[in-house]
Amino acid sequence: MFLKNVTILRDQIPSFKQYPFSIPVIFKLKKLSFKQSVTFFVGENGSGKSTLIEAIAAQIGFNKAGGSTQNRFEEEHTVSTLHNYLRLSWLPKVTNGFFLRAETFYQFASYLDQLQRENPDDIFASYGGISLHEQSHGESFLSLFKNRFGKKGIYLLDEPEAALSPARQLALLKIIHDLEKEGQSQFIIATHSPILLGYPNAEIFNFDDGEIKKINYEDTDHYQITKYFLENREGLLHHLFREEEEEGGVN
């Protein structure tokens, strides 16, 4: 493991009334410690998990819109200043790795195309040998995971399941396992996927309820709702649709 602690420099924050410091989990957070090589952030959209993982990536030196320390393309969405108020504790410090941001992956792929046009080197060699735009969305994600990820690195993934089928999510778990089993790679992943969350011995932090708390896999909403749906699909859907009809005044 490399990254041990993330500490918020609260005494330097100008105002907790402003975004992103007004987000409840950020407002209350003092220090977050990592005990496992694979850590998951879970919570509803807007709970702060993507904001925190982006800030960690930026403080490491990765591009806030996605990529590594060498990638420098801009994305208008990346407006948070949280990274300026984080202190990262390392043992040892590493800067090798990658920040995957699903919602800006198209822009990242376009950035690589531009580099390939401007540079005589084979930029695509680290991404499967061809442009990510010439692969399906899911194929391009797996090409990145298989070819760009390597040993002794820290990998921050923000909703990697966005382009992955269940089978390809399992393929990602195998890639994570192969890189993590030698103790030379660390993963911090924000996800909604009950498949990814099932990775053995991972640490899961729940961002709901206004503060960050550890949670067991079986206690997450992602697991419980999925399990209940699979075991009670017909009854659950019947009840759900009947409620909608009653609320809409449908006879």
Image: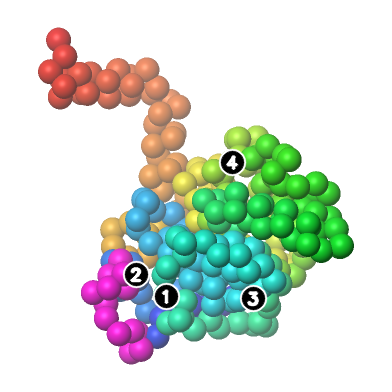
Dot 2 lies on which element?
loop
Q: Earlier along the polypeptide chain: callout 2 or callout 1?
A: 2
| Marks 4 and 3, how far apart at CA | 28 Å
Circles 4, 3 touching at the beta carbon (< 8 Å): no
Picture layout, residue 209 above or below residue 83 = above
Which of the 4 quarters of the picture holds residue 163? top right
Q: Nearer the viewer, mark 2 or mark 3?
A: 2
Q: Which mark is residue 20?
A: 2
Q: Earlier along the polypeptide chain: callout 4 or callout 2?
A: 2
Q: What residue type is labelled 2?
A: Pro
Q: Which mark is residue 133?
A: none
Picture layout, residue 103 above or below residue 234 = below
Q: Earlier along the polypeptide chain: callout 2 or callout 3?
A: 3
Q: Which amino acid does label 3 sit on?
A: Phe
| Marks 2 and 1, how far apart at CA | 8 Å
| Marks 4 and 1, how far apart at CA | 28 Å
Magenta segment main secondary structure: loop
Circles 2, 1 touching at the beta carbon (< 8 Å): yes
Is residue 17 inside the magenta stretch? yes
Percent x, y of residue 101: 55, 56
Q: Which mark is residue 81?
A: 1
Number of other residues with Cα within 10 Å of mark 4, as a class: few under 14, some 14 to 19, many 20 or more: some
Is residue 181 inside the magenta stretch? no
Magenta extent: 10-23
Percent x, y of residue 208: 33, 56
Q: Earlier along the polypeptide chain: callout 4 or callout 3?
A: 3
At horizontal 78% and vertical 57% (from top left) the residue drawn is 117
Circles 2, 3 touching at the beta carbon (< 8 Å): no
Picture layout, residue 101 above or below residue 241 = below
Q: In this view, does 78 lie to the left or right of 128?
A: left
Q: Can residue 177 be seen in this view?
A: no
On the image, numbered disc 3 is attached to which residue? 2
